[in-house]
Image (tube, helix red, strand yellow):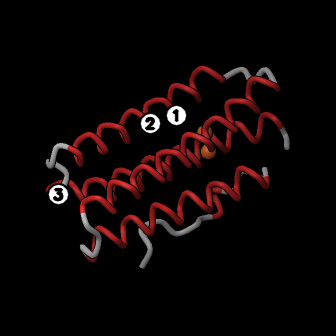
Amino acid sequence: MPLIEWKDEFNTGNPSIDQEHRELIGLINDLHEILRKNVSTSDETADFLGEIYSQISAHFALEEQLMREEKYEDYTGHKTDHDRLLDDLRDIMDGHHTGSFESMEQDLSNQLEQWFSVHFSTFDIKLHNQLGH
Ligand SMILES: [Fe+2]
Ligand SMILES: [Fe+2]
């Protein structure tokens, strides 16, 4: 069973944002599966974390560009939450690098699930509702 199932409340109504959210959820589910089955080497897990990090950064950059173009009023609050998610992800990658990661695999999956479920269904929905497209 995947870690994160797509839910209706994740739909922002913006097709490119929703498409990227689906892809991010797919990546997070794949990571969860890899960790759960313990089938990947430490290097493969590090590569996978790097891949997730770059896709998430690109996605956040897209939303931030949209917000700047539209002079979105809660740009700062939304961007602060993006930065927090990226900081946490960097901490996880550092933890993995220094070897303290194995004990936190379960935490990692839970944390990612929390972050993205909450961010999609709060900040991203509000963004869509206010921009109206
Ligand atoms: Fe966002
Ligand atoms: Fe998003």
The reply, left or right, for residue 104 in relation to residue 120 is left
Find disc 3 in the rendering and name its residue.
102
Between circles 3 and 1, the one closer to the viewer is: 3
Three-letter amino acid code of the residue under disc 1: His
Between circles 2 and 1, the one closer to the viewer is: 2
Instruction: Say which residue appears at 79% left-offset and 55% top-offset.
Output: 15
Q: Is residue 40 above or below residue 56?
A: below
Q: Pick whichever, 25 or 56, lies toward us.
A: 56
Find disc 2 in the rendering and name its residue.
86
Instruction: Say which residue appears at 55% left-offset and 57% top-offset.
Output: 24
Quadrant observed for ligand 2 in the rendered image = top right
Disc 1 CB within 8 Å of nearest ligand 1 atom: yes
User: Badges 2 and 1: C-beta atoms under 8 Å apart?
Assistant: yes
User: Badges 2 and 3: C-beta atoms under 8 Å apart?
Assistant: no
Mark 3, secondary structure of its residue: helix
Find disc 1 in the rendering and name its residue.
82
Q: In this view, does 42 lie above or below 122?
A: below
The reply, left or right, for residue 126 in relation to residue 84 is right
- Crowd around label 3: few <14 · some 14–19 · many ≥20 (10 Å): few
Three-letter amino acid code of the residue under disc 3: Glu
| Residue that extends furthest to the front in the rendered view of this protein | 43
**Labels 3 and 1: the sequence-earlier one:** 1
